[in-house]
Amino acid sequence: MNPIPHYRSFLDLPRVDPGYRPVEERVRDWQEVEGHLSPDELARQAARCMDCGIPFCYGAGCPLKNPIPEMNAAALESRWEDALQLVLTTCPYPEITGRICPALCEGACCNAKDSEAVAIRQIEREIGDRAFEEGRMVPRPVAPRNGLSVGVVGSGPTGLAAASDLNRWGFDVTVYESAKQAGGLLRYGIPDFKLEKWMVERRIELFRQEGVRFECGVRVGRDVALDYLRRKHDGVLLACGAREPRDLPVPGRELKGIHFALDFLIRQNQAVSGERSGIGAEWSARGRDVVVIGGGDTGSDCVGTSVRHGAKSVTQIEILPRPPEGRADDNPWPDWPRIYRASSSHQEGCERLFATNTLSFEGDESGRVYGLRCVQVEWQGRKPVAKPGTEFFRKADMVLLAMGFTGPGKDAPDAAGLERVWSAGDMVTGPSLVVWAAARGHDAARQIAVELGQLSEA
Ligand SMILES: Cc1cc2nc3c(=O)[nH]c(=O)nc-3n(C[C@H](O)[C@H](O)[C@H](O)COP(=O)(O)OP(=O)(O)OC[C@H]3O[C@@H](n4cnc5c(N)ncnc54)[C@H](O)[C@@H]3O)c2cc1C
């Protein structure tokens, strides 16, 4: 008999998060920063799920529609295999989303309306981790081959989700990936301190064992024509992501030391995994005053990476105003709360400037950036207006541009005039989240299977 009362514990038990490893320890390595809840604490957290009549967590929150109340109940009762099978019905890689998902479900949790959300992401992470530890995360059964084949271009979370579904439904699936290794931004964008890469490799190995083939180092459109792939397979899914960076065309942009954020992060991920021997002097933040322009997750990842390099100072500049501490009137539950957040990287040592625009970069006689001219802005509707008399100079000998991505870019494969070619994920929607990429990968797989006559529409 479990001593924890079911479905009323949210009244008695506070939310507890595992927190992070101490800053002084974690900035010396690239390993995961987040801690783990003890088994007892995790059970208490699962007991905070009130099994509400209308679970907004998956109705309004989770793009994958994970069966969250059922997963929580199974975790509470230590029915870990049941919990695993439940999450695998909707999520192709719970040990990954359980780490890096912002947990839209928690924003929509009924407890979050008046109190604190259930720690849903921690429970999902534990379900995945335990399954690996106990040898229960094994290749899943696949249907007999149906004689049809699909080529998936891109091995990010969209391509992986689609490939896994199609393979299990009996299609022969080959994933074509331009990078040396599979995983997309899971491998090359997101830093190891959020998601260690052996976990990505472990998941890809499972897909491989289930029968998905991976051909890495193949750029479709350059090394092999899309038209050829289309003839080789019965259908092709393009899942090439959205990596074209938004630029900042202000005076001085051409100076040395100004880089796009993703170029910086990719190099670091390659260095950690041994794919390149080091990051190189030009790309190291060591001893430098670093300014990251862009206040989102990519910018935050640049902050954590720069701190680990040993930067002299790190500043993150955001043009939008500082978000409120609590929900604004136009941002009610169960919408995702647009509130002020400090990531683990921010806590490692970073100054954050909001409502700040960059006017120009200043360079020294060698042509290297040595600072930025900025101005504070006031938002009038959707327009930032410079506040008179607020111009200032910020020293920087390394600048990282993390202002988002505009789309797949002009080199993306062009499917014009080709039939039976689908596209999905960030490539279609623009930059998004891993959980949305997974959901869109599932949707694309289903559509392909329906249109190739292997699934009914229902
Ligand atoms: C730095 C950074 C940090 C992020 N952190 C988070 C986070 O913490 N949580 C979260 O939920 N989301 C995060 N995101 C967003 C998330 O990573 C993306 O939304 C997600 O990866 C999109 O998946 P995708 O498969 O559509 O594209 P991608 O992951 O970009 O994968 C596309 C793949 O297609 C390949 N490709 C492209 N063109 C070709 C071609 N012609 N031939 C062959 N292969 C090709 C690419 O090499 C790549 O591997 C982050 C994004 C960035 C940039």
Image (spheres, rainbow, N blue to C red):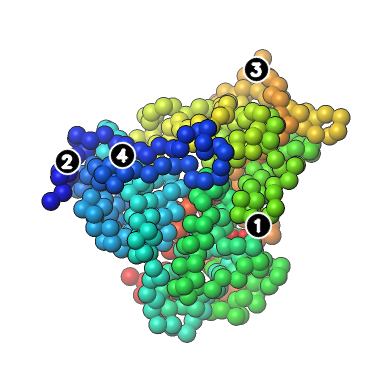
In this picture, is 209 found above or below 130?
Answer: below
| Measured Cα–Cα span from mark 4 to mark 2 | 14 Å
Residue under pointer 2? 8
Can you tell which quarter of the image residue 11 is in? top left
First along the sequence among labels 3 and 4: 4
State yes or no: Cβ of the residue under disc 4 lies below 8 Å from any atom of ligand 1: no
Give the mark, 2 or 3, whose residue is nearer the N terminus. Answer: 2
Say few, some or many: other residues with alpha carbon within 10 Å of mark 4 (under 14 / 14 to 19 / 20 or more): many
The residue that disc 1 covers is 275
Q: Which element type, helix, strand or loop, lies under badge 4?
A: loop
Mark closer to the observer (3, 4): 4
Q: Marks 1 and 2: which is nearer the front? A: 1
Q: Which amino acid does label 1 sit on?
A: Glu
Q: Can residue 67 be seen in this view?
A: yes
Q: Which part of the image, by quadrant, shows the C terminus? A: bottom left
From the viewer's side, name the closer residue of 247 and 106: 106
First reached walking from the N terminus: tag 1 or tag 4: 4
Res 111 quadrant in image: top left
The x and y percentages for residue 275 are 65, 57
